[in-house]
């Protein structure tokens, strides 16, 4: 079973927003928000919704670990596989411009 905390952990590890997950699952953002706010197992959510979210996050590179497995003595967790689709952080302000210039230079555009 999947927990709200695991969904939050997976989003953080992948650097995804709730909007990113909503787009990837074709679920409404409010549905994703409701799931991430729940504590414990997502038994109050529709099973089809939980399965869709879990499969999407697994396809993005997350493995869900139950409490007590693989050193998770404090509860359930998330482990990223090496092929995880981590979203690149977008630099802001001056750093953003410098990063864009560096990438363009590396690609031979400047």
Image (cartoon, rainbow, N blue to C red):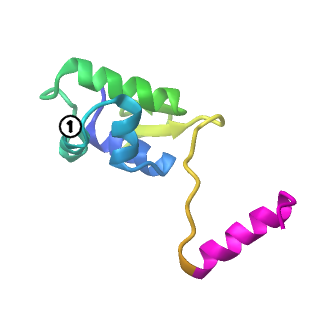
Percent of width and height locating residue 18: 33, 47
Task: Please tell me which residue lies in front, 5 or 102.
Answer: 102
Q: Is residue 75 visible?
A: no
Residue 99 highlighted magenta (yes or no):
yes
User: Considering the numbered disc 1 on the image, is that residue within a helix, a strand or a loop?
Assistant: helix
Task: Please tell me which residue lies in front, 107 or 62.
Answer: 107
Percent of width and height locating residue 92: 53, 73
Which residue is drawn at the image coordinates 55% and 49% (left, top)?
87
Q: Which residue is mark 1?
A: 31
Q: Quadrant of the N terminus?
A: top left
Residue that sits furthest to the right in the current view:
108
Would residue 27 appear left or right of 84 to someone viewing this image?
left
Would residue 13 appear left or right of 109 to someone viewing this image?
left
Task: Please tell me which residue lies in front, 5 or 34.
Answer: 34
Would residue 109 appear left or right of 45 to someone viewing this image?
right
Q: From which residue to which does the magenta span run?
A: 94-110
Taken as a whole, is the magenta stretch helix, strand or loop? helix
* Quarter-of-image position of residue 27: top left
Which residue is drawn at the image coordinates 66% and 37% (left, top)?
82
Q: Is residue 56 visible?
A: yes
Which residue is drawn at the image coordinates 50% and 46% (left, top)?
14
Would residue 47 appear left or right of 89 to someone viewing this image?
left
């Amino acid at each position: 079973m999947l927990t709200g905390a695991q969904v939050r952990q997976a989003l953080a590890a992948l650097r995804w927003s709730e909007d990113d997950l909503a787009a990837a699952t074709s679920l409404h953002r409010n549905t994703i928000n409701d799931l991430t706010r729940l504590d414990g197992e997502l038994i109050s959510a529709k099973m089809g919704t939980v399965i869709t979210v879990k499969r999407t996050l697994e396809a993005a590179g997350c493995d869900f670990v139950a409490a007590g497995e693989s050193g998770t003595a404090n509860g359930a967790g998330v482990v990223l596989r090496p092929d995880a689709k981590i979203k690149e952080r977008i630099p802001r302000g001056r750093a953003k411009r410098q990063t864009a210039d560096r990438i363009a230079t590396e690609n031979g555009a400047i």
